[in-house]
Image: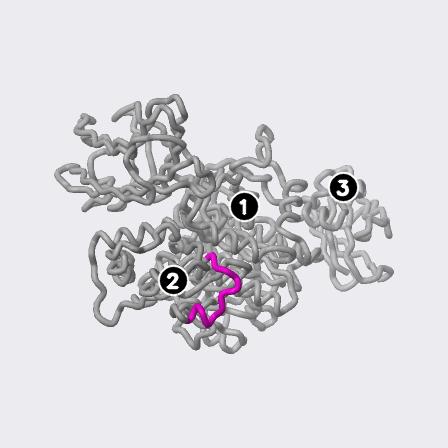
């Protein structure tokens, strides 16, 4: 309700402009267009002195347009890559600005949400976080690990090394604005400023970012819960998500859009550029994209930002909990499914390659008796036209709004949007079937996790076309972004009270059933890769704990520093899988700082684990499979060509370095001889030693070797003792 009111007042200023009939709607993206029209019909008027609300937008703009020319329209440009600019725009200037010949298109989209909010908070203590002697060769040192998220505890000891905070730069977009260098918020660039800030502005109500940064880059402090790239340079941006509404002043509400998020990504990449370091960004948020238009500039802008040593990783989302998709093939008269929406407004999108109609069929919830049918014909709708109608359900008047525009990706396809608004939650009304008809046409229907579909065969078996898939979130669905889905490796966890909590039945090592699947709405085959995302332990915010002292069910341990309790907790979702992949890519960038997104995809294709052998890869669940960080490192170093080096680590041996001594810790004393072979990264064998009676703990001096990276190969008749490990001498 709060956001609805803010949206209304922010668009009041536009209504008088719309009433003049000259507003160039064709230049606006569907989300902006829908919002403008939605409030135009309410005929609100802005209070005196409150006309100039600001919003952040992408503009397809002639690169030669100067800042002085933009200033004529009270516009402030915060970034421009080629012909795409990010501009802060007063709503009162939108009409005149849109008329400029140098302005071809204006886009913005909704706020994201964190991609763990549709699954339980659970954990998995993965070996990559347990084994403190792993990754001695590559630790993320010299690489910037960027994270844009919410709810950071900046003082959590997992982000410090020997008492020094590893967070080097922090832009809190929700903080009170200081100066005008940044469009919103404030940045903190010194250890003292970051320490004094303590937590992000939303740190008392959010915890998500503390957890994801801990997975990607946390040092673990006095626990085994260490992140992947635990010596990387951390740069953070705290952005706005849907649950941050209460923290934002009404006048600033529309400064926060997808364009503001794009500036957050650019802030991190710019920081890395100043440090002359490669960078990978982890982004565990997303929003339901429009079919193919609303995000074209966002997608293109990210494509211009990413490249050699500039990698963006985003979560696929947890949208597979409910069916959100329906398809009617040509030659089929009609298909349908029932609306499943716990909000007062249900919103669905249709893509059709020919004429179609929509029927809303109402059934009594108790008797299953058909009550009425409401037909909506699209045959007479003009492009960019909006039609309205009324439907009475259970004696409650519901408003129907439909919009039509051409697909940008395929001009032969038409996009329709259906908005059904009721005075109560849709699921509290009678059962409503959403049926599409048109035998000549192929029609696809798209919902979301909050605007889902369902099959009710006991009500009417004809309308059971609800299906899963086509639900990957933006910006993970963009071509420039590495999109991450989740797998499950542990079905439960031990909480801080010592109790085992089982909360998943997904087969170990396989696709997590909540993880979003492709193809994406833009037609791309997403996700690109999966990683463990179920039951992951990482850092939790001490500030969140103070504000929610009873929210300890997901906590597994505590660390005390200077009398303050810092918790460790469990979460699940593609939010957790994404920093696993981003942290792994940080290790790869340390080995090769010039890796491009295409290079990363190539590594995925050659080295990923394929969990289900019967499937073809890449596919819409796993992408190329589940990431294998170690195989990826061997691939980057060209060590996969050395047949004597195993492409896996030994299961029953920890390998590490202590000074110039090789340290081997066997889980139990070997009963069979073990051969230790040492290779350079050029694949040259420099040492070979047979341990005929190895001890449980074996130390081997390597003083004869020069400093560098080496592959330690253990070979034994016992397969659990056989494998390789990269070490740094």
- The quadrant in which the N terminus is found is bottom left
**Cα distance, mark 2 to mark 3?**
78 Å
**Which is in the foreground here, disc 2 or disc 3?**
2
Labels 2 & 3 near each other (Cβ < 8 A): no
If you read the primary sequence from the N terminus, does the residue marked by circle 2 or circle 3 appear first?
A: 2
Identify the residue under disc 3.
671
Q: Nearer the viewer, residue 282 or 395?
A: 395
Range of residues picked out in magenta: 60-71
Identify the residue under disc 1.
532
Q: Please state the horizontal and vertical placement of residue 198, each as a whole percent of the image.
A: 45, 72
Q: Is residue 167 visible?
A: yes
**Cα distance, mark 1 to mark 3?**
33 Å
If you read the primary sequence from the N terminus, does the residue marked by circle 1 or circle 3 appear first?
A: 1
Identify the residue under disc 2.
97
Q: Please state the horizontal and vertical placement of residue 694, each as a whole percent of the image.
A: 79, 48
Does the segment drawn in magenta span residue 322? no
Labels 1 & 3 near each other (Cβ < 8 A): no
If you read the primary sequence from the N terminus, does the residue marked by circle 1 or circle 2 appear first?
A: 2
Label 1: which secondary element: strand
Q: Please state the horizontal and vertical placement of residue 60, each as a whole percent of the image.
A: 47, 56
């Amino acid at each position: 309700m709060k956001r609805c009111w803010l949206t209304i007042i922010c668009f009041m200023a536009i209504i008088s402009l719309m009433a003049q009939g000259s507003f160039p709607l064709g230049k606006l993206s569907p989300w902006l267009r829908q919002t403008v029209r939605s409030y135009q019909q309410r005929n609100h008027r802005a209070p005196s002195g409150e006309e100039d609300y600001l919003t952040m937008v992408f503009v397809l703009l002639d690169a030669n347009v100067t800042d002085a020319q933009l200033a004529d329209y009270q516009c402030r440009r915060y970034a421009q890559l080629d012909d795409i600019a990010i501009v802060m725009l007063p709503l009162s200037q939108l009409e005149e600005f849109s008329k400029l010949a140098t302005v071809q298109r204006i886009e913005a989209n909704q706020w994201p949400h964190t991609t763990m909010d549709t699954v339980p908070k659970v954990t998995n203590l993965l070996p990559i976080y347990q084994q403190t002697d792993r990754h001695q060769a590559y630790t993320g040192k010299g690489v910037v690990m960027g994270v844009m998220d919410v709810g950071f505890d900046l003082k959590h000891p997992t982000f410090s090394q020997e008492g020094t905070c590893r967070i080097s730069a922090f832009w809190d977009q929700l903080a009170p604005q200081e100066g005008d260098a940044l469009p919103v918020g404030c940045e903190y660039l010194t250890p003292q400023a970051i320490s004094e800030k303590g937590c992000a502005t939303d740190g008392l109500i959010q915890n998500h970012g503390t957890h994801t940064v801990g997975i990607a880059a946390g040092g673990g402090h006095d626990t085994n819960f260490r992140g992947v790239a635990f010596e990387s340079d951390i740069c953070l941006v705290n952005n706005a998500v849907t649950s941050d509404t209460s923290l934002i002043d009404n006048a600033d509400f529309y400064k926060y859009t997808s364009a503001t998020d794009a500036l957050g990504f650019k802030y991190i990449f710019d920081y890395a550029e100043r440090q002359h370091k490669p960078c990978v960004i982890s982004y565990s948020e997303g929003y339901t994209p429009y079919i193919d238009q609303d995000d074209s500039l966002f997608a293109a802008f990210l494509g211009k930002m990413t490249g050699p040593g500039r990698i963006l990783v985003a979560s696929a989302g947890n949208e597979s909990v409910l069916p959100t998709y329906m398809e009617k093939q040509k030659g089929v008269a009609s298909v349908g499914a029932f609306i499943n929406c716990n909000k007062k407004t249900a919103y669905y999108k249709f893509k059709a390659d020919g004429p179609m109609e929509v029927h809303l069929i109402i059934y009594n919830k108790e008797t299953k008796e058909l009550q009425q049918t409401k037909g909506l014909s699209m045959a007479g709708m003009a492009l960019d036209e909006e039609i309205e109608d009324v439907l009475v359900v259970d004696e409650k008047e519901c408003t129907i709004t439909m919009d039509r525009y051409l697909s940008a990706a395929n001009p032969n396809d038409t996009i329709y949007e259906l908005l059904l608004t009721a005075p109560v939650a849709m699921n509290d009304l009678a059962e409503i079937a959403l049926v599409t008809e048109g035998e000549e046409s192929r029609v696809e229907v798209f919902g979301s996790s909050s605007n889902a579909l369902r099959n009710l065969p006991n009500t009417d078996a004809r309308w059971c076309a609800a299906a899963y898939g086509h639900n990957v979130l933006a910006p993970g669905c963009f071509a420039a972004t590495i999109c991450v889905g989740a797998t499950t490796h542990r079905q439960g966890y031990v909480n801080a009270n010592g109790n085992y909590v089982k909360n998943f039945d997904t087969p170990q090592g396989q696709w997590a059933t909540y993880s979003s699947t492709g193809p994406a709405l833009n037609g791309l085959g997403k996700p690109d890769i999966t990683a463990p995302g179920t039951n992951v332990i990482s850092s939790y915010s001490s500030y969140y704990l103070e504000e929610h002292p009873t929210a300890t069910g997901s906590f597994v341990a505590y660390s005390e520093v200077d009398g303050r309790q810092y918790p460790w907790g469990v979460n699940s979702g593609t939010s957790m899988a994404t920093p696993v992949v981003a942290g792994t890519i940080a290790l790869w960038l340390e080995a090769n700082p010039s890796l491009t997104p295409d290079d990363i995809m190539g590594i995925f294709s050659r080295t990923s684990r394929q969990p289900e052998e019967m499937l073809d890869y890449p596919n819409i669940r796993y992408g190329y499979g589940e990431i294998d960080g170690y195989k990826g490192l061997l691939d980057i170093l060209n060590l996969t060509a050395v047949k004597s080096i195993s492409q896996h680590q030994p299961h029953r041996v920890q390998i590490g370095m202590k000074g110039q001594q090789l340290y081997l810790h066997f889980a139990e004393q070997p009963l069979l001889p073990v051969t230790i072979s040492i290779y350079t990264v050029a694949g040259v064998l420099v040492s070979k030693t047979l341990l005929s009676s190895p001890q449980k703990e074996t130390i081997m001096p390597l003083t004869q070797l020069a400093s560098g990276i080496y592959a330690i190969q253990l070979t034994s008749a016992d397969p659990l003792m056989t494998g390789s490990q990269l070490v740094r001498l």
